Amino acid sequence: MHDDLTTAPVPGLVLRIAAPASVGYFFHTMFNVVDTAWAGQVPGMSTRALAALAASFPVFFVIIALGGGLATGATALLGTSLGAGDRSAARRLALQGLSLDLAASLLVALLGPLAAPALFRALGAEGPYLDACLAYMNPILRAAPLFFVPYMLNAALVAMGDTRSLRNIHILGCLLNVGLDPWFIFGGLGLPPLGLAGIAWATVLVQGLGCLYLGARLLRSGLVERPRAREFVPCLRTWAEIVRQGVPAAVNMLTVGLGIFVITRYFSLYGPEATAAYGIATRIEQIALMPSLGLGAAVLTLTAQNRGANRPDRVRESLRRSLALGAAVTVPAGLLVCLLAGPLMGLFTSDPAVVAVGRGYLRIAGFALFAYVLLYLAVSAMQGLKRPLFAVWMGLARQIAAPVLLFEFFTRVLHLGLPAIWWGIAGIVWAAALFAAAWVRRAMDRILGPA
């Protein structure tokens, strides 16, 4: 499949890669939406369960960041090798990436449960609220390999232009989750009621099935047929190559998690209702941003392959076409989020305090959706060009430095309340997006030559 990524018309390739990826991301988000909806039904702890899921997301994001970051770095390297026609190097990178991911995930499984209580306390969780957070998070941390390994399996598939495989497992996982969540929460058919922890165990089961499916798809792809055990033995040179590209991407994704941690901390100043509202609102934002995530996958893959094939014109066209398509989808979506903020929040909770906070946030956040598109695609383009440090500095500034400075000033000095945080988030995103767009344009001229 990868051969025509350097020769076929770019608009068709963008759609071919982005559309399945976007559908997959949609169902992945709907998986989380199902979790959120059922958390609101956990007996005796509805609002506390919703707040626990919202507070758990920054911790969960550590797994996403480490696994997804290493996979992003591997995709850039694999795509460049495939674009240059070096399949042996691509095979080596894919198999060594799997062994690296497994080693990293075992470390998380060992240390994660030990660090989780302190992290949740830093978010203001104590007593029954802390117990709820740990009940959800500990099973996921202990099953970290089932979350890491699929990222690397998918990295090899995406580098070849295959985003359908991940789409398929996300669709199946979401459908399974609709039945697994209530079964695991309330029990039945020989299974005792697990409460909030049941949501986590349902996720672990789905991840295990996804790991098996993606592994089978990669074996059938022709890239790593009949792998030998010695090919998984750590090669420090290849690990270092993946780490150089993957760690900056992981750090960038970690800054997203830290940014959510920072924002959640400031929302928590206004009570569990505000924290729960932010958790629900971010799910709604994620649904609206699905197309941009798929477009990011297309930009990363096409940039890496066409740079490897020495086709700078196609690199630029990939980014340009993706930006135009992103604007056509997310601008109308942002307007709908603004107009339907209240009813959208009402789909997940009947608590009027939670709905009121989430409605106010979404009416502002809807105007920032296209800014996220600019950021995602700029970062994807730089990663495809094997310049991953751009994402790190952008993430540190946007996710941590700017929010801490602004929110401390707004809440501690000016005492402006929650609306100042909502406007602050939107302003930071737009400022970062405009800067990123200008920076990437200049960077492409330096790396690829003048347009």
Image: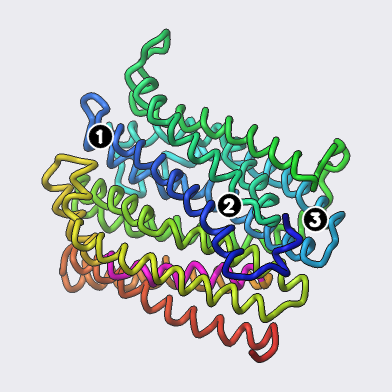
State the image coordinates of residue 46 (x, y, percent, origin top left).
22, 33
In the rendering, which numbered label is found on residue 317? none
In the rendering, which numbered label is found on residue 90? 3
**Location of mark 1 (residue):** 40
In this rendering, position of residue 178 left or right of residue 126: right
Q: Is residue 379 magenta?
A: yes
Mark earlier in primary sequence (2, 1): 1
**Location of mark 2 (residue):** 68
State the image coordinates of residue 175 (x, y, percent, origin top left).
43, 32
State the image coordinates of residue 304 (x, y, percent, origin top left).
69, 67
Which amino acid does the dot numbered 3 rest on?
Ala
Magenta: main secondary structure equals helix
Q: Quadrant of the C terminus?
A: bottom right
Which amino acid does the dot numbered 2 rest on?
Gly
Instruction: Label 1: state its secondary structure.
Output: loop
The segment highlighted magenta reads: 365-384
In front: label 3 or label 1: 3
State the image coordinates of residue 268 (x, y, percent, origin top left).
25, 52
Which amino acid does the dot numbered 1 rest on?
Gly
Given the current orientation, which residue lies at the most extreme left position?
352
Q: Quadrant of the N terminus?
A: bottom right
Q: Mark 2, residues whose alpha carbon is within 10 Å: few (<14), some, or many (≥20)?
A: many
In this rendering, position of residue 154 left or right of residue 408: right
Q: Between 402 and 124, which is closer to the camera in this rendering? A: 402
Residue drawn at 70 percent across, 51 percent down: 156
Mark earlier in primary sequence (3, 1): 1
In this rendering, position of residue 393 left or right of residue 424: right
